Image (cartoon, rainbow, N blue to C red):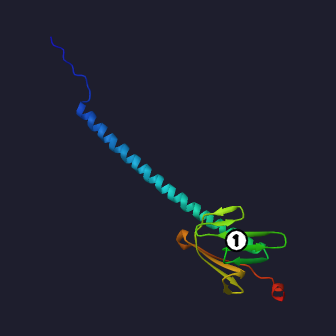
Amino acid sequence: MKLTSRIPAYTLAELIVVMILTTIVVGLAFSTLRLVQSHMTAIQANYDKKREVGQFNSLIELDFNRFNNITYDKNTDVLTFKNPLDSLNYQFSESKIIMGEQTLNIPISEKVFFYDGEKREAGEIDAIRVVMDSLNKAQFFVFKVNDPTRKIN
């Protein structure tokens, strides 16, 4: 009497096919993860730029309304805000803006200064138009209403 019973099992060929398919799926998962991580990095960089631009816009609007005397020196590329109690400088460079102790990495492609509606290269100003290289050429215009007594003095 011969007892031959087969044990149910997978063949070597079946196991190799399953391992190959698993390797392909894991490889696709890792490449997708890498792609998602690169997109997230780009989104974070874009968000940081938008935040810095918004922060710069808010700060310069506050300073335009907080200080009485605003001057621009073309030689040093410095915007100076002064009032009787305080003063503040904005140092512009090609890739960043230094405002006191704070630095914003915002490349500015164009700055146009105005006083009483007329363009000015330097000296006392009451408005500025800024165009930034980042964020699809973001731009904004900031002005302050001059005190009527300034015309008398």
Farthest top residue? 1
**123 displayed left or right of 47:** right
Which of the 4 image quarters holds residue 110? bottom right
Camera-side residue of 36 and 81: 81
Q: Amino acid at mark 1?
A: Ile
Dot 1, how many residues are within 10 Å of its Cα: few (below 14), some (14-19), or many (20+)?
A: some
Residue occupying the point 44% across, 50% down: 34
34 lies above or below 68: above
Which of the 4 image quarters holds residue 59? bottom right
Picture coordinates of residue 79, whole percent (x, y)? 70, 74
Instruction: Please give the residue where the numbered disc 1 appears in the rendered image.
Output: 60
**113 displayed left or right of 38:** right
Picture coordinates of residue 9, whole percent (x, y)? 26, 27
Quarter of the figure that contains the C terminus: bottom right
Quarter of the figure that contains the N terminus: top left
Farthest left residue? 1
Picture coordinates of residue 75, whole percent (x, y)? 66, 77
Mark 1 secondary-structure assignment: helix
Camera-side residue of 41 and 74: 74
